[in-house]
Image: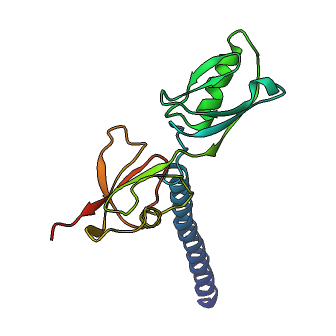
Amino acid sequence: MTFLPTLSCRLCLIGLALVLGSGAVSAEQRPRVSIQGLTMAEGPEQSAYRVGTGDRVKVAVFDEKELSGIFIVSAEQGISLPLIGGVRVGGMSLREVENAIVFRLKDGYLKDQQVSVEVLNYRPFYILGEVHRPGSYPYVGNMTELNAVVLGGGYTHRAKKGQLFMTRATDPERLEKPVKTTDIVRPGDVIRVAERFF
């Protein structure tokens, strides 16, 4: 009489442990997945690229070759397209640029038009301060601060090696902040290598 209740209790406990255990595992996995998704969607390295002065963009208007072409974003943050003229695109994501062009085309020209925009050449970045060749350089994807220093001819003898400051092109306040040599450079960024005083 005591064997069956004990066996059933043991089975119940084992089943409960399995349910709780599997629930704990899935509960751990769900936040991990959502956190990774948040990082990919909203992290600074994954955020949508913002168009700026000096970018060379390709605009393709579906089935309208005369309206398509390659354009350079001007100092006034705009591009001039056939038929519709100037479109201000500075600070916009590529999707926003597409929407802006579609909106202008709908205004008395074309309806339900498909437009795609891609960046062919990104605007340059700048390196200043204690490097041998300060100036502007073409942007290359996944470039680090140290790569930028090498492009600038390396540190001068007066450089405070490893002490870099950067002004992000996407920062509306244009604040200069310290960065690491492993940080990623983005189009339009301004890097400054500090000078040592001893």
Give the image quarter of residue 5: bottom right
Q: In which quadrant is the N terminus drawn?
A: bottom right
Q: In which quadrant is the C terminus drawn?
A: bottom left
Give the image quarter of residue 34: bottom right
Give the image quarter of residue 115: top right
Q: Residue at x 65, y 24 (%)?
A: 101
Work out whether 106 lies above or below 45: above
Q: Residue furthest top?
A: 108
Give left or right: position of 107 versus 138. Answer: right
Q: Position of residue 95 (x, y in %)?
A: 62, 35
Give left or right: position of 177 versus 116. Answer: left
| Front-most of residues 101 and 47 | 101
Q: Position of residue 56 (x, y in %)?
A: 61, 39
| Front-most of residues 35 and 68 | 68
Give left or right: position of 108 versus 182. Answer: right
Q: Residue at x 50, y 29 (%)?
A: 77
Q: Residue furthest right?
A: 63
Q: Position of residue 177 (x, y in %)?
A: 30, 53
